[in-house]
Image: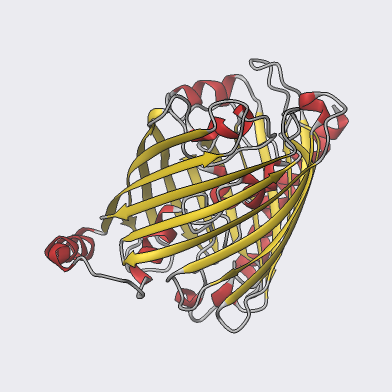
Amino acid sequence: MQFNITLKTFFVIGFLFLFQFSFAQQNENPDDLPKLGSNDQTQNRESVDDSVKVSVFDLTILQPYFDFKEKLYKKTGLRFDFDYNALYMGSTAKMGEGKAAGGVFRFYGAWDLVGKKTSNLGTFIFKLEHRHKYTTIPVIDLSMDMGNVGIYGVTFNNNQFRVTHMYWKQKLAKGRIILLGGFFDATDFFDIYALGSPWAHFNNLNFTTGLSATALPGDAYLGLTAGAWITDHIYGIVGFGDQNSDPTMMFRGFETFFNEHEYFKHAEIGFTTAKEYVFLDNIHLSVWHRDNDKSRGTGWGWGAVFSATKYINKKWLPFFKASYTEKGESLLEAAVSTGIGYQPEPNGHQLGVGVSWGRPNADTFGAGLKDQYLAEAFYRIQLSKRVAFTPGLMYIIDPAMNPEENSILLWSFRARIAL
């Protein structure tokens, strides 16, 4: 009990710390401040898509549609997009189905409503999705189905219709502070780094948020988050939310938030040498804690994630990440991942290669499971500004719950079109 009280006090102090130091800072050019949040945060995703310049062919036939959207944004402050994502994964696995495929349709956008001509902008952000499987099992179940402790294609499940974003984002202190309240994806503001998108980068969760060694809530929950630029090179993020929230039944989250009092809490402190490359040239430490979950019968837990990336010659991005969890019933109790990304042109074609080690969580699976090792590579081909195709390979060594095989080879094909 004392541990929980101390940790909750820590998060309150964290909020106050961010506010005090950020309001004290002066910035004559608030528009120069980079946006906090992952590449998959709705506004950041729209910005990344708009900045793509390298392509094999252009969808010029759709230019009138894009012109209409731009006029609508200038007139009303509303920006919206649709995209469709598909993923197929096959393998040499003798255990389980051995293959899986699925798709996700998304409608998302941001509506600037308050303070449009100021740096203290208030925005309503939304994202509605339909996630569905093509095969007997969804992609998210493929890893455990073949006896590997982990997750592939974490966003490719069979939730059907769901609400991933429905929240208010408010800027304060000339844009140095952001406040979020509502229904959003915790991973957009926790352990964020440039190659962490399951939509655009690695398929294995060991290379994304928390490295499988974090007991994350579902990828949409009801909560509050605050982020701030403490100086021009140091940022902080703190937040908490209802770990019982269900994105397929959004309004039930209000009931569990106020009645169950079972929360996921997190804090992050990060440093960047160049603020325009905040998540490319970055070192950060993230800590988290989750309460007992009485409805699911799972216990409390806590952990930490260390992450370091370095942007070299505007092309290379080596990374190193390490994660540890105590209890919490995560997939892994410890994990280390390292690798490199290469992108000849910003937001164009991209190569990623990584290797990872992980120890299954004894609190979740019991003692005695062997450590797992894996390697993954992908190459995202930006066919046009709005169309991408990403083939990939993955090699698993010593899948912990598969006594029949010492290694498994997997191949994947992922595609995305955004309109």
> Relative to 277, does residue 379 appear above or below in the rendering?
above
In the drawing, does residue 379 fall left or right of residue 298?
left
In the foreground, 182 or 50: 50
Quarter of the image for the N terminus: give it.
Answer: top right
In the drawing, does residue 193 fall left or right of residue 399?
left
In the drawing, does residue 68 fall left or right of residue 345?
left
Residue at point 52% right, 49% down?
198
Residue at point 64% right, 24% down?
261
Q: Position of residue 132 (x, y in %)?
A: 38, 31
Q: Residue furthest bottom?
A: 313
In the foreground, 53 or 73: 53
In the foreground, 118 or 290: 290
Quarter of the image for the C terminus: give it.
Answer: bottom left
> Relative to 385, does residue 323 appear above or below in the rendering?
above
In the drawing, does residue 140 fall left or right of residue 408?
left
- The quarter of the displayed image where residue 239 is located: top right
